[in-house]
Image: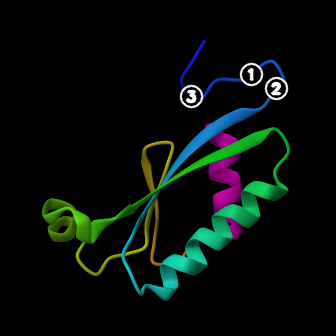
Amino acid sequence: MSGSTSTDGDDGTATVPVTLYTREDCSLCVVARETIESVAADLDGVTVDIDEVDVDTDPELAEEYGERVPYVLVDGHPAFKYEVDERDLRLKLLAAS
């Protein structure tokens, strides 16, 4: 009974993994994280597990994403680039839960 899961728990809460590709000194990345946290806090029955990845720590990621950060995956699927739209994020999180 260990490990995280994206299925409903006993309390009816679903956990949705969100990956945020970022880098240091990225103001848009800070705004994206704040938006994700704010939307997640307002959703009943959905918990968000944010995995923040600094693309500059991995040469392959730095090459793949370059300056295209923040880049956000919701439940493993590409969702946002540069800006996170609150309404779209809410819909994507509910659909993934």
Marks 3,1: beta carbons within 8 A: no
Q: CA distance from mark 3 to mark 1?
A: 10 Å
Secondary structure type for disc 3: loop
**Quadrant housing residue 15:** top right
Which residue is denoted by mark 3 in the rendering?
Answer: 4
The answer to which of 33 and 80 lies nearer the viewer is 33
Question: Which of marks 2 and 3 precedes in the sequence?
Answer: 3
In the rendered view, tell whether residue 10 sits above or below residue 73.
above
Asked whether residue 85 appears in the rendered view, the answer is: no
Q: Amino acid at mark 3?
A: Ser
Is residue 6 a member of the stretch shown in magenta? no
Which residue is denoted by mark 1 in the rendering?
Answer: 9
Q: Amino acid at mark 2?
A: Gly
Q: Amino acid at mark 1?
A: Gly
Magenta stretch, main secondary structure, is helix
Magenta residues span 84-96
Q: Is residue 56 left or right of residue 11?
A: left
The number of numbered discs placed on residues in the rendered structure image is 3
In the rendered view, tell whether residue 96 sits above or below residue 60.
above
Q: Residue at x 14, y 65 (%)?
A: 59
Secondary structure type for disc 2: loop
Depth check, mark 3 against mark 1: the one in front is 3
Q: CA distance from mark 2 to mark 1?
A: 5 Å
Residue 24, percent from left and from top: 38, 80
Residue 37, percent from left and from top: 69, 62
Mark 3, other Cα within 10 Å: few <14 / some 14–19 / many ≥20: few
Which residue is denoted by mark 2 in the rendering?
Answer: 12
Depth check, mark 3 against mark 2: the one in front is 3
Secondary structure type for disc 1: loop
